[in-house]
Image (cartoon, rainbow, N blue to C red):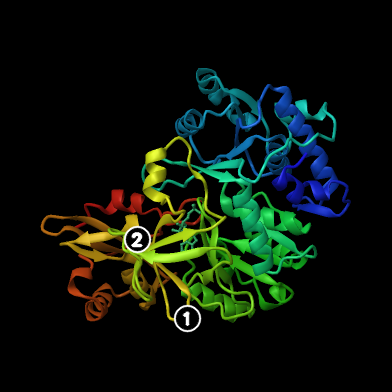
Amino acid sequence: MANPLYDRLFGIHASKTEPFLLLQDGTTLTYAQFLATTAQLAHTLVANGLNPGDRVAAQVEKSPETLALYAACVQAGFIFLPLNTAYTSDELSYFLDNSGASLLVCDGANAETLQPLADQLGVLLKTLNGDGSGSFMQEAKGHPTTFETVERDLQDLAAFLYTSGTTGRSKGAMLTQDNLLSNADVLVDYWRFSKDDVLLHALPIFHTHGLFVATNVILAVGGAMIFLPKFNQDAILQFLPKATSMMGVPTFYTRLLADERFTNELTAHMRLFTSGSAPLLAETHHQFEERTGHRILERYGMTETNMSTSNPYDGERRAGTVGFPLPGVELKITNPETGVELPQDSIGVIEVRGRNVFKGYWQMPEKTAAELREDGFFITGDMGKVDADGYVHIVGRNKDLIISGGFNIYPKEIELLLDEQPGVHESAVIGIPHADFGEAPLGLIVAEKGKNPDLEQIMTIVKKHLARFKHPQKLLIINELPRNTMGKVQKNILRDEYGEAV
Ligand code: AMP
């Protein structure tokens, strides 16, 4: 029976004895082995009384079995709902309740804590540990290694991914088979993936970047992945010689650059390094090129839209930009208040439309209507512009906007200037309460190792370059910027901590 996502990404590989996953312990899992486990897990889901369309929540460590659980959900017609392993049981309670999940698969170490919550919500609880053990796998082992794929069509839901939610309640983004499949196809072409690719995979798989962008692209071409449980410099350096490509968040690259063992020789054979999920500093881009000769290919996407723009494979990969709208993606810049499209070079909110754009937020019609226009354009909440050459620039987030005395300030503009100053490693500008103007910017600076930036001097330069209303009330040196697991600076934490700093 037809199930496009399963057939195209998984089914076609069912009898292949080529490697799919190369694991840190040196073992290899072939496609056939992986898909045999997938079938066993699909049987287990059905044997537990789940019906097509049910949600399967998983808060588990990254492992081949976790990935097989995603594949099993696709094969048996369930909606996969991966959850960040850092979430507390309070947070989990919200996700389970909101999604109406029928089953929670969790790590054995958390089972005792989560059982009362599961009982209270009427959710079945099974365990799957990082080493592939646990009650769920135990059950799976007793099932056949083939499974009759459940019929689905392109408009059926494949996954719910709760948005990172650095502010407000997380929303369950509903992703269809078509969203995932169309994006995988486009990225394979745009980034020239082939069956000869071996992708170094150190991203988490509870997030769109590691789960869909990286994994679906490799599955679409029948390539292989070096599947590391998490980012670890030693492991990256050890496995790089076997890889052809790597996808990362900016933090991966800054950490690698801080390691002297990360050299030109080690990366000479590599075909592609991509970066996304958070802005890559132009400085990191340049340092990476100096060290390795490779230009990192930066792209832009989000949970709700999959990938929307990318720097080109062959053309100029321009530092500080996220490249061009991908084929099939329409992108426009609009006035955040009126929704009217703005001309080239104007800063406004980025809106995108295409097969990549999600179906809406689960059981949140008002939130969906507020962000997803009837004509199909999704209001990303990211502020940006398109330059004369067509490159898209991201300058900040709409929510990040500081309004001071009625004037709009885009923190990114100040941060870029601060980042350029001697002794500054990176910076974050936040809005803090101001008696007169409502809000005012505060500049938080992380110094380069062993350096002591001259704040007075920096303030003089800021005053020289920026309009008065943009001048930070104060500049402060702090040890580091708090980041979430995807490398995004958590400005809400900074606001909590430094909101009273002036
Ligand atoms: P998430 O849904 O967790 O993937 O977060 C999506 C958000 O990450 C986007 O709305 C952007 O604000 C940010 N983001 C993703 N890629 C980039 C990039 N290359 N540069 C700047 N911000 C990015």
Label 1 C-beta lies within 8 Å of the nearest ligand 1 atom: no
- Density class for disc 1 (Cα within 10 Å; few <14, some 14-19, many ≥20) is few
At 42% across and 37% down in the image, what residue appears?
Answer: 364
Q: Is residue 414 above or below residue 61?
A: below
Residue kind at label 1, given as amino acid type: Asp
The CA distance from mark 1 to mark 2 is: 37 Å
With 472 as the anchor, is 376 left or right in this view? right
- Upstream in the sequence, badge 1 or badge 2? 1
- Indicate the position of residue 424 as horizontal and vertical percent values: 38, 72
Mark identifier at residue 64: none
Q: Is residue 304 above or below residue 280?
A: above
Of all residues, the one furthest to the left in this rendering is 436
Q: Quadrant of residue 416?
A: bottom left
Q: Is residue 232 visible?
A: no
Count of marks, rendered view: 2
Quadrant that contains the C terminus: bottom left
Q: Quadrant of residue 382?
A: bottom left
Residue kind at label 2, given as amino acid type: Ile
Of all residues, the one furthest to the front in this rendering is 375
Q: Is residue 485 above or below residue 112?
A: below
Q: Which residue is mark 2?
A: 478
Quadrant that contains the N terminus: top right
Q: Which residue is mark 1?
A: 389
- Indicate the position of residue 233 as horizontal and vertical percent values: 63, 60
Select label 1 or label 2 by which is in front: 1
Q: Secondary structure at mark 2?
A: loop
Q: Is residue 207 above or below residue 259?
A: above
Q: Quadrant of residue 398?
A: bottom left
| Depth order, front residue of 3/193 | 3
At 68% across and 37% down in the image, what residue appears?
Answer: 73
With 411 as the anchor, is 2 left or right in this view? right
| Depth order, front residue of 101/411 | 101
